[in-house]
Amino acid sequence: MQLQSLNQTQLQALERELAEQYQSFQAQNLKLDLTRGKPSSEQLSLSDALDGILAGNYKAEDGTDCRNYAILDGIPEIKRLGAAIMGLPVEQVLAGGNASLTLMYQTVQHALTIGFNGPDSAWQNEGKIKFACPVPGYDRHFTICEFFGIEMIPVAMTDTGPDMAALTELVSNDPSIKGVWCVPKYSNPTGIIYSDDVVKAMAELPKVAGANFKIFWDNAYAVHDLVSTPNPLANIFDYASQAGTDDAVLQFCSTSKVTHAGAGVAFLGASQANLASFIKGLSVSTIGPDKVNQLRHARFLPDMDALQAHMQKHAAILKPRFDMVLKYLNEDLANTGMGEWESPEGGYFIAFDTLPGLAKAVVKLAADAGVKLTPAGATFPYGKDPEDRNIRIAPSVPGLDELEKAMQIFVLSVKLASVRQALAA
Amino acid sequence: MQLQSLNQTQLQALERELAEQYQSFQAQNLKLDLTRGKPSSEQLSLSDALDGILAGNYKAEDGTDCRNYAILDGIPEIKRLGAAIMGLPVEQVLAGGNASLTLMYQTVQHALTIGFNGPDSAWQNEGKIKFACPVPGYDRHFTICEFFGIEMIPVAMTDTGPDMAALTELVSNDPSIKGVWCVPKYSNPTGIIYSDDVVKAMAELPKVAGANFKIFWDNAYAVHDLVSTPNPLANIFDYASQAGTDDAVLQFCSTSKVTHAGAGVAFLGASQANLASFIKGLSVSTIGPDKVNQLRHARFLPDMDALQAHMQKHAAILKPRFDMVLKYLNEDLANTGMGEWESPEGGYFIAFDTLPGLAKAVVKLAADAGVKLTPAGATFPYGKDPEDRNIRIAPSVPGLDELEKAMQIFVLSVKLASVRQALAA
């Protein structure tokens, strides 16, 4: 069934049928939640061995007593894990506290007020500055920009990453654009992986950008694959080294969706010069990260083999949930002309694009039938999706039964909104 | 022996005798360290039960799964502990991450750039601002001011707290003074406790100060008593309520020197209005504190009785160290006219005032004989002690044998510097 091929009578009949189904769901008074990209209890339990893992041995491999003050950039064994995740030498890694979001906030603040390359390089010297924001994107990135008064310029995403021709033109014409947000692997929310060409073009972007341009490379889902032979993400620092732009790349990742969310370890990967500058600023606001928790994580995940074996257990829990979402989208909405989506092979989200102007309506219909979705627009700067199309689906928390019911309501809401729009046209 | 009563010949003889002793210490090639106010390994081991204490139960008392995202202000049971330490209702407490220093940095930043009482209250609107800094004080407080470009105005400390007459006059004559740093109990570094009168006058200070004045009440040593019946510190919020200045007080404390330093829980105590404003700002930079570690601490220290029993074990380890320092000061330097000090009944420091102009010389003499001391001047804004007198002694880390040797060298260095100064006069 193609929506566009239906005549008015067919549309009316379909609307009645869908509305009836919708009312029967409403009558069930469901309370389902597809909003938060957080692990389920089942996933969290995979890491319950963390507490108690030290067995009284609080010494890091270099002899550091992790129970006492000292060390701003993390203990060696956890830095090694972060280095392996990010594909960087350990000298280019800082292991921090429990949130990569905090490291992103701090690095933006550092670039803005202190400057990675001395006081003259602080963005605030140049007055009003801007960030390029591939959309749809991650709302918390946008919130950081809003907080610091950084204007956000949207750039379209494609299924291989940001539209690099558009981004390159934008950045080369406006030296007040000082940064770009990227979630290069299993992009939040579309789930795509940046292609090699995109990574290469991104690494070359600083050459045409204004001074002190930085790429915020939020590699949040670096090891969060759902398939056994995932498509690889190119190492941006390899391309940056070729382009001579190492100092323009700041990479982030964390164990938040590996072990316990909010009780893990976050990492920053950067050039040694950038790290040294950042750590100097950091010394004002902290006595150092929680090294005891870093040590727990290093003992729990001693190397990449252990990490990958652990992530396969996550995949075994998550994959059926992604499959369920995609099953309903494919079976009920493919070839209907009512929306578009990608089929991510990792990460935490599936993004659905409705027909123009319907995202808010679909979110409201779903909510009124008991399915909570992330507010439409949340994946755009200032919460404003200009076409009102994008909806982020987070399938990790509900059980499979709940998820199935939620997806039945979701596709029904999409159909109902689409048919009603066609009727009103 | 009074230095001032010695004639030139006696001074010369004494100098020769002291120099000989000094050389014999130098020959021992010692490496002793009295710099850092951090717990000893023995103290840290008191809390080794923390790791593993959860025994697989990661649920907070309100049902929160501490392993997942959520909650910016901490879980109920740990907030209750912070509330008991600070003498506040739990509604006025935020439990944060691993460092009260970070909370101080963040609250200064919040007051400066966001404003606790809306954008109009942000200090930055008023251009250049200042802080009053009782001296000697804590270097990391001063570093925060320097970082944010806040000018520091020193105010003298007495043995009952800051000179409140001087502070009140200063603040009432200069509305650009927006804050004051206080370590009210076992003051860093002099070890004194603010008297009731001082606490009351402090709570009344905001009434004569410029708009949006804040008292940074760093109650770092709230429960760090060395004696069984410690002198109490008055509750500043009681006086603030009477004076109507609740919104001007920000209190800080942490478990850093209770459990594992740098792996504990920090607390902010403030009016509910201030807390709400702060938490709103915090939501930009963090996904919340490490609740798993908060839960560990709440299980380990379920109430004030447990906390106090635990602190007595710390006291049993620390008290002999303080006694050792004071023994050498009292036996070798009392009534010599070569210096002054307090006898703290808690905290982590003993501060020694040399004769004017000798602190740097004493620190250098001690260093050259193998005893590392905090750099002279570190306890003053910009690292500048105008009289070059104050030296901070941190006796917690060395073993008693080492500490004894270090104190022999310290008092010898004081005598040698004093005698040489008298000879040169």
Image: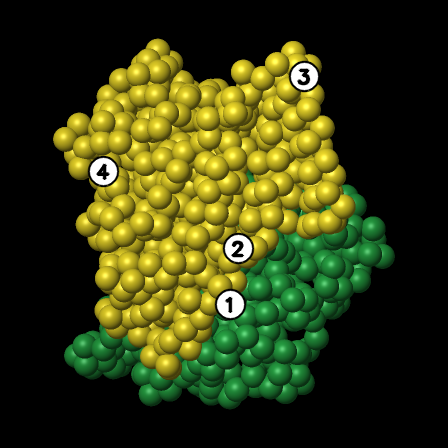
Chain colours: A yellow, B green
Asked if B33 appears above or below A129 in the picture, the reply is below
Mark 1 vs mark 2: tell me if same chain.
no
Does any portion of residue A137 appear in the rendered image? no
Q: Secondary structure at mark 1?
A: helix
In this view, the mark in front (4 or 2): 2
Chain designation of label 4: A
Asked if A79 appears above or below A172 in the picture, the reply is below
**Residue closer to the observer: A75 or A117:** A75
Coordinates of residue A95 in the picture (x, y in percent): 34, 55
For label 1, the crowd category at 10 Å Cα-Cα, with few meaning under 14, some 14 to 19 and many 20 or more, is many
Q: CA distance from mark 3 to mark 2?
A: 37 Å
Quadrant the C terminus of chain B occupies: bottom left
Q: CA distance from mark 1 to mark 3?
A: 62 Å
Amino acid type at circle 4 is: Ala
**Residue closer to the observer: B28 or B124:** B124
| Quarter of the rendering containing residue A122 | top left
For label 2, the crowd category at 10 Å Cα-Cα, with few meaning under 14, some 14 to 19 and many 20 or more, is some
**Badge number at residue A185:** none
| Quarter of the rendering containing residue B11 | bottom left
Q: Earlier in the sequence, mark 3 or mark 2?
A: 3
Q: Secondary structure at mark 4?
A: loop
Coordinates of residue B197 in the picture (x, y in percent): 76, 64
- Left or right? Give the position of B157 relative to A275: right
Q: Earlier in the sequence, mark 4 or mark 2?
A: 4
For label 3, the crowd category at 10 Å Cα-Cα, with few meaning under 14, some 14 to 19 and many 20 or more, is few
In this view, the mark in front (4 or 3): 3
Tag 4 near tag 1, CB within 8 Å: no
Residue at 56% x, 83% y: name it: B310
- Left or right? Give the position of B321 relative to A65: right
Q: Secondary structure at mark 2?
A: helix
